[in-house]
Image (spheres, helix red, strand yellow):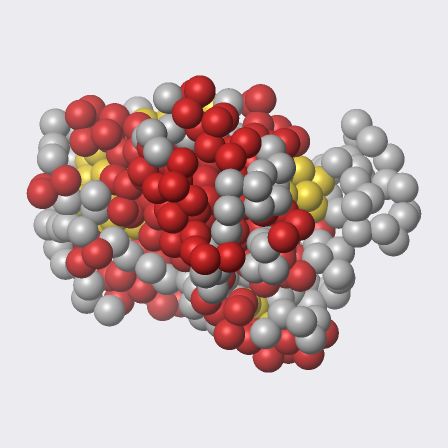
Amino acid sequence: MELNEFIKNFADAIDGVDLASLSPNTNYKNDIEEWDSLAVMTVLAMIDSEYKIVISGEDVENCNTISELFELVKNRQ
Amino acid sequence: MNANIKAISYYLPEKILSNDDLSEEFPEWSVEKITSKTGIKKRHIADKTETSLDLGIKSANKLLRENNIEPTSIDYIIFCTQSPDYYLPTSACIIQNELGLTTSCGAIDFNLGCSGYIYGLSLSKALIESGQAENVLLITAETYSKFLHREDKSNRSIFGDGATSTLLSKCETGSILDFVLGTDGSGKDNLIVKNGALRNKRENNDDINSGDYLYMSGSEIFVFTLKMVPMVVAGLLKKNKMQMEDIDLVIFHQANKYMLETLRKKINIPESKFYYFLEEVGNTVSSTIPIALSNAIKSKRVCKGNKIMLVGFGVGYSWGGTIIEI
């Protein structure tokens, strides 16, 4: 499971977000303008469809950066 | 002869809340944004004096009138709501009187939301096939709008009010096949009106976060459906010894378009078999499935002999599914 691919999948999941604006240290809740309740759901759906695990809204809430979320998903696989 | 659905009618309150109306109240919430996020363009909202009982009775009168049903032929009333007029008496008892049904009717209320119609079908089938009833009037009626805070733009964009009435009897053709039902009360706090019944008193607090108003965690509900609904669909096919190829139409509880699309793709249900009906009415809770089913039948999307899979899921958590042959 690769971090760069995860970041690309993350960008694809959210409407209007440019891959170039994201990095492993992006704090998605604060730094992404388009971040809202639908963004949480689209990221959850992406993780389910690409990585075959269902994490919770709370998991997404408790992580801060994209790399932290990546580590959480990797550990759950 | 098996129990089957003979007729469905529905009633929606006159007042409409459109995306334009919402956008006017919440300027940062554009019409485009609302439509694309929810798949909903308008919802019907009960007015101050209109209750679930009123809506339910209107839908029942419509059913009787549109199908020339003799009121005295009904021998059981089942009323599904989570926004009842009274703690007591039972709303179904009041309905018996208002519709002029005989006093030899059975009448009960039950409290379920998104899974309500499936449970109603399950109970109706059991009553008919055990010989306890011949003509069951199943009514779903909901006024979630009365639980919402005026500043709760998310939930006000999603929920609509409405009621449906279904007549179930023994039929020569068609049947209601086997059910899959389930419950997980650990999800209780993710869709709840905390105050106002007997556990917690109303705070009479205007704060949007007050337990006086409906709270829903969209993401937790979404996670629950992603885990559960595929299993229900698989379980239904297995129990009824069918494959998805045998199913002519799939109608899920019409929660919101994004969730439904995600589920459809995850379960691999072809677009051509997956029915949507929420743009004009929103999420009417226990009424979404019968409203969609009624429209699928009226618009001839399905015809006699077709097999339709119905799946409801949500508040409780509670879920259920069945396959009907119309």
In the image, B139: left or right of B169? right
Q: Residue at left 74%, top 65%?
A: B48
Relative to residue B205, is residue B49 drawn left or right?
Answer: left
Q: In which quarter of the image is residue B121?
A: top left
Image coordinates for residue B105, horizontal then vertical, percent: 48, 39
Report the front residue among B240 and B76: B240
Where residue B283 appears, as percent x and y from the top left, is: 50, 56
Q: Give the residue drawn at x 60%, y 33%.
A: A63
Residue B156, placed above or below residue B15 = above
Examine the rendered structure and indicate whether residue B126 appears above or below residue B175.
above
Residue at position x 57%, y 59% in the image: A34
**Number of marks in the rendered image:** 0
**Residue B55 quadrant:** bottom right
Task: Return the residue nearer the eye: A59 or B74.
Answer: A59
Q: Is residue B260 at least partly visible in the picture?
A: no
Residue A53 percent across, percent down from the top left: 38, 28
Horizontal arrangement in the rendering, residue B124 relative to residue B185 (left or right): left
Q: Is B185 above or below relative to B293?
A: above
Answer whether residue A22 is visible to the viewer in this image.
Answer: yes
Q: In this view, does B291 lie to the left or right of B110?
A: left
Residue B137: image x %, image y %? 42, 46
The N terminus of chain B: image quadrant: top left
Q: Farthest right residue?
A: B204
Residue at horizontal 75 percent and vertical 47 percent from the top: B213
